[in-house]
Image: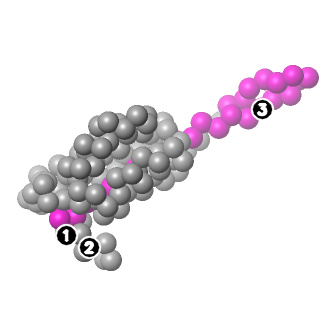
């Protein structure tokens, strides 16, 4: 059975978040949580929370054993952007885009669910 959890509007750009999500895609949940605990990237903490939330959803809502769960899919999608202006020389202005992202985690107790 596939169970998911979503974290929205995380203040880290999706490109940097994908470095973290690709490191744990396809692993067991316990292994992924151990890896995320020691990754130096800033995106490791929110991803760890979302993976733990998906495991808790599976355990509490569907009575699945958290030790048997795999990460089927983990995606960092683009969210909104805060647009700001930075003054430059000769009266010009430079655009600053502060990017945010959503992280979606899908876990399952059966690793063959990936095709569904």
According to the image, label 2 marks what residue? 113
Instruction: Tell me whether the residue at label 1 lies in contact with that at label 2, contact meaning CB atoms closer than 8 angstroms.
Output: yes
Q: Position of residue 20 (x, y in %)?
A: 42, 46
How many C-alpha atoms fall within 10 Å of the one at disc 3: few (<14), some, or many (≥20)? Answer: few
In the image, residue 48 sits, relative to residue 75, either above or below, namely above
Could you tell me which quadrant the C terminus lies in?
bottom left
Residue with the mark numbered 1: 110
Mark 1 is surrounded, within 10 Å at the Cα level, by few (under 14), some (14 to 19) or many (20 or more) other residues, namely some
Q: Which mark is residue 94?
A: 3
The residue depicted at 82 percent of the width and 24 percent of the height is: 88
Residue range corresponding to the magenta coloring: 84-109
* Secondary structure character of the magenta stretch overall: strand
Closer to the camera: disc 1 or disc 3?
A: 1
Element under disc 2:
helix
Which quadrant: the N terminus?
Answer: bottom left
Q: Is residue 40 above or below residue 8?
A: above
Q: Secondary structure at mark 1?
A: loop
């Amino acid at each position: 059975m596939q169970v998911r959890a979503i974290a929205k509007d995380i203040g880290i750009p999706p490109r940097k978040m994908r470095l973290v999500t690709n490191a744990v895609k396809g692993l067991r949940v316990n292994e992924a949580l151990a890896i995320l605990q020691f990754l130096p990237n800033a995106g490791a903490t929110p991803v760890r929370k979302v993976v733990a939330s998906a495991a808790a959803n599976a355990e509490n809502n569907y009575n699945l054993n958290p030790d048997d769960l795999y990460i089927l899919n983990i995606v960092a999608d683009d969210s909104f952007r805060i647009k700001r202006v930075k003054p430059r020389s000769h009266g010009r202005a430079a655009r600053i885009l502060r990017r945010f992202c959503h992280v979606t985690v899908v876990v399952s107790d059966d690793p063959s669910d990936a095709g569904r």
